[in-house]
Image (cartoon, rainbow, N blue to C red):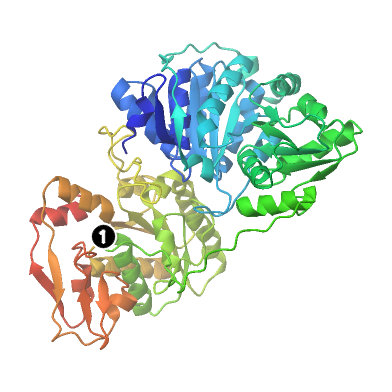
């Protein structure tokens, strides 16, 4: 990905994503180490830093194998005095939570910023957890940008605060902050600290109980100092009349919604508005000062009522009696994203103002539903088709234990090969339990290549150690496709696009002790079917784990590569005289490039077809054939051999 705006000149204004603004702030602060694991909506921070590093030669940037490793790598760098950042989506912090808690005990020797991108509304996630709770639980301050424009300033302030306190800080972004573009005024780039010195201190860096007890007391003392300092931090601002009886508190992005709503209600000049960026720990003195003389406080925040709950606790402790409205009072929803109209309606109700929401524009026709589908030519389509056939031909029933990735779309008809989908690595993990308690079905765990390296290895070890009979189907398309085609240990390149050592999945699983391993070309449906049928026999009759690696390039990568190498792709057509309108190609195989006519006979949409050729294998009447053959290199690109 290209992010030239991250290297803009001092004083210029650049249109950039909130994530890119975070990356720019890291360059302006002098961050020397950056690590992360790709996950929407956080991925662009590392991508932009990698782009900068490929031009500047610094900072050090890596895609780590998972969030825990990424966290520990950046934590270790900050221990040695190098300003560091680690990035991940909200659920990724669950993976990294073990070292997260410990980092608050030990502190660090340089800035250590933990970027957690939350996903209210679950646009690309399995839940919408609010990671500010981690700040409360782990005693780690949380900064929340009030929008994409403020992402740079909030990041700089968080990095400085972390440096001064020698303590980790969480920067909590959300989808709308991370993925909104806004003009950002740029500061000067700083030369980073790239090398550090680790000072041995057993009583600090070794968290055994004897040392941890002392470190906890130091942490609590440091927490009080941080609370004191954040109460006076000028990044939290206030506007509106001091004598207003109503105080509206906009937390992070909630400030934008609150201000816009007050503007709509013509109440900006009559209501006191407090903007909170440093939400954890709440700036106690500032809140008490601004609560004085109010009859009501309204809290507008994205996610759970975290700040609202903490504010109520502070007011109760200080014996301040004032009504607090927000999500707990049900004026705002606890689920999903904030909505401008919902915030305006809530404020109007609390302020006793009239508000008539705009009448939505209803189109004269209802657009047809467009559920997400696998891309034309996606290697997963042929694998899922072959998987269904293999199970049926073996006269077996299967439980499909799925995982997180593009292949999650296998849950939809006609494939229906994702009976469970919980979290990364959970496919094999759940299969470990299912295999021991469900005796009359074959257990098939599917996992992608990036997820395999992220979280699949311990689960496979467990299945071998505890004798769980299952098929592990590893879908290797050579990239982390769902989050934007970032590299991983099996891709053969690093975060900066340089050549890196490539780990071969079948070699890795053999090294883990798996004795039965098969490899098939994802674009050869018959080969995949045969390998899976063999694996079913092993599982049923031998009671062992059998790993099948289905290897075929992500079709988007393959097409790009073919274009750059000027490799001609084949063109396929349908012989209408041979077509029997059976529907296998567009129903069972479900290729979106194949269109049925009124009589059920099909044609191929040339603008959608990419030339994968699997439909030719699928058609039982040989009605699909090559019109123009492609170059031999095309097959090698699909097979990830070129």
Q: Which residue is mark 1?
A: 520
| Residue 556 pos. (x, y %) | 27, 53
Which of the pair 59/151 is nearer the observer? 151
Which of the pair 51/385 is nearer the observer? 51
Visible residue check, residue 31: no
Which of the pair 168/533 is nearer the observer? 168
Q: Say above or below: 222 vs 138.
A: above
Q: Say above or below: 390 vs 31.
A: below
**Rendering quarter of residue 94:** top right
Visible residue check, residue 399: yes
Which of the pair 147/581 is nearer the observer? 147
**Rendering quarter of residue 395:** bottom left
Residue 67 placement, left or right of 512: right
Numbered marks: total: 1
| Residue 472 pos. (x, y %) | 40, 59
Secondary structure found at label 1: strand
Q: Residue at x 35, y 25 (%)?
A: 7
Q: Residues within 10 Å of mark 1 (few under 14, many from 20)?
A: many
Q: Residue at x 47, y 42 (%)?
A: 180
Q: Residue at x 48, y 36 (%)?
A: 18
Q: Say above or below: 223 vs 573.
A: above
**Quadrant position of the N terminus in the picture:** top left
| Residue 418 pos. (x, y %) | 46, 65
Residue 15 placement, left or right of 517: right
| Residue 350 pos. (x, y %) | 79, 49
Residue 228 placement, left or right of 529: right
Residue 439 placement, left or right of 574: right
Q: Residue at x 15, y 53 (%)?
A: 636
């Amino acid at each position: 990905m290209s992010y030239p705006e991250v290297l803009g000149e001092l004083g210029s204004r650049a249109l950039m994503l909130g994530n890119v603004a975070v990356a720019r702030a890291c360059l302006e602060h002098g961050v020397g180490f950056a690590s992360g694991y790709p996950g929407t909506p956080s991925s662009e921070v590392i991508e932009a830093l990698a782009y900068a590093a490929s031009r500047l030669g610094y900072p050090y940037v890596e895609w780590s194998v998972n969030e825990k490793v990424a966290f520990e790598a950046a934590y270790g760098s900050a221990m040695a005095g190098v300003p560091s950042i680690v990035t991940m989506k909200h659920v990724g912090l669950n993976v990294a939570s073990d070292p997260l808690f410990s980092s608050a005990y030990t502190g660090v020797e340089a800035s250590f910023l933990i970027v957690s991108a939350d996903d209210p509304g679950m646009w690309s996630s399995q839940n919408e957890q609010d990671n500010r709770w981690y700040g409360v639980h782990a005693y780690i301050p949380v900064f929340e940008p009030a929008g994409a424009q403020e992402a740079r300033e909030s990041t700089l302030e968080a990095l400085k605060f972390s440096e001064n306190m020698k303590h980790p800080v969480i920067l909590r972004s959300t989808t709308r902050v991370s993925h909104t573009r806004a003009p950002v005024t740029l500061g000067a780039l700083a030369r980073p600290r790239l090398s550090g010195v680790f000072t041995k201190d057993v009583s600090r860096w070794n968290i055994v109980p004897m040392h941890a007890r002392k470190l906890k007391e130091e942490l609590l003392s440091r927490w009080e100092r941080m609370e004191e300092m954040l109460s006076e931090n000028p990044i939290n601002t206030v506007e509106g009349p001091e004598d207003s009886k109503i105080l509206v508190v906009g937390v992070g992005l909630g400030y934008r919604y609150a201000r816009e709503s007050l503007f709509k209600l013509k109440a900006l000049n009559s209501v006191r508005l407090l903007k909170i960026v440093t939400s954890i720990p709440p700036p106690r003195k500032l809140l008490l000062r601004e609560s004085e003389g109010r009859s009501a406080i309204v809290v507008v925040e994205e996610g759970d009522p975290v700040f609202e709950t903490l504010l109520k606790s502070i007011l109760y402790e200080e014996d301040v009696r004032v009504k607090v409205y927000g999500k707990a009072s049900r004026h705002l929803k606890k689920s999903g994203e904030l909505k401008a109209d919902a915030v305006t309606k809530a404020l109007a109700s609390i302020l006793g103002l009239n508000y008539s929401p705009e009448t939505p524009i209803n189109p004269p026709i209802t657009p047809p539903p467009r559920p997400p589908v696998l891309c034309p030519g996606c290697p997963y389509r042929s694998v899922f088709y072959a998987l269904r056939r293999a199970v049926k031909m073996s006269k077996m029933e299967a439980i499909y234990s799925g995982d997180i990735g593009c292949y999650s779309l296998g849950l939809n008809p006609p494939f229906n090969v994702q009976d469970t989908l919980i979290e990364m690595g959970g496919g094999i993990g759940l299969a470990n339990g299912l295999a021991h308690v469900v005796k009359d079905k074959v257990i098939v765990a599917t996992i992608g290549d990036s997820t395999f390296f992220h979280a699949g290895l311990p689960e496979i070890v467990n299945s071998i150690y505890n004798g769980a009979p299952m098929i592990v189907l590893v879908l290797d398309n050579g990239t982390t496709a769902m989050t934007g085609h970032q590299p991983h240990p099996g891709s053969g390149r690093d975060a900066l696009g340089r050549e890196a050592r490539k780990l071969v999945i079948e070699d890795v699983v053999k090294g883990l002790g798996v004795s039965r391993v098969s490899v098939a070309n994802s674009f050869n449906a018959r080969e995949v079917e045969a390998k899976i049928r063999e694996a079913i026999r092993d599982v049923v009759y031998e009671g062992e784990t059998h790993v099948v690696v289905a290897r075929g390039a992500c079709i988007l990568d393959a097409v790009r590569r073919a274009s750059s190498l000027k490799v001609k792709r084949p063109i396929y057509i349908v012989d209408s005289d041979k077509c029997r309108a059976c529907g296998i190609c567009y129903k069972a195989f479900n290729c979106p490039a194949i269109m049925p006519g009124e009589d059920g006979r099909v044609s191929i949409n040339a603008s959608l077809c990419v030339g994968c050729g699997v439909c030719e294998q699928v058609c039982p009447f040989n009605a699909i054939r090559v019109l123009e053959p492609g170059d031999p290199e095309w097959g090698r690109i699909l097979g990830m051999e070129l």
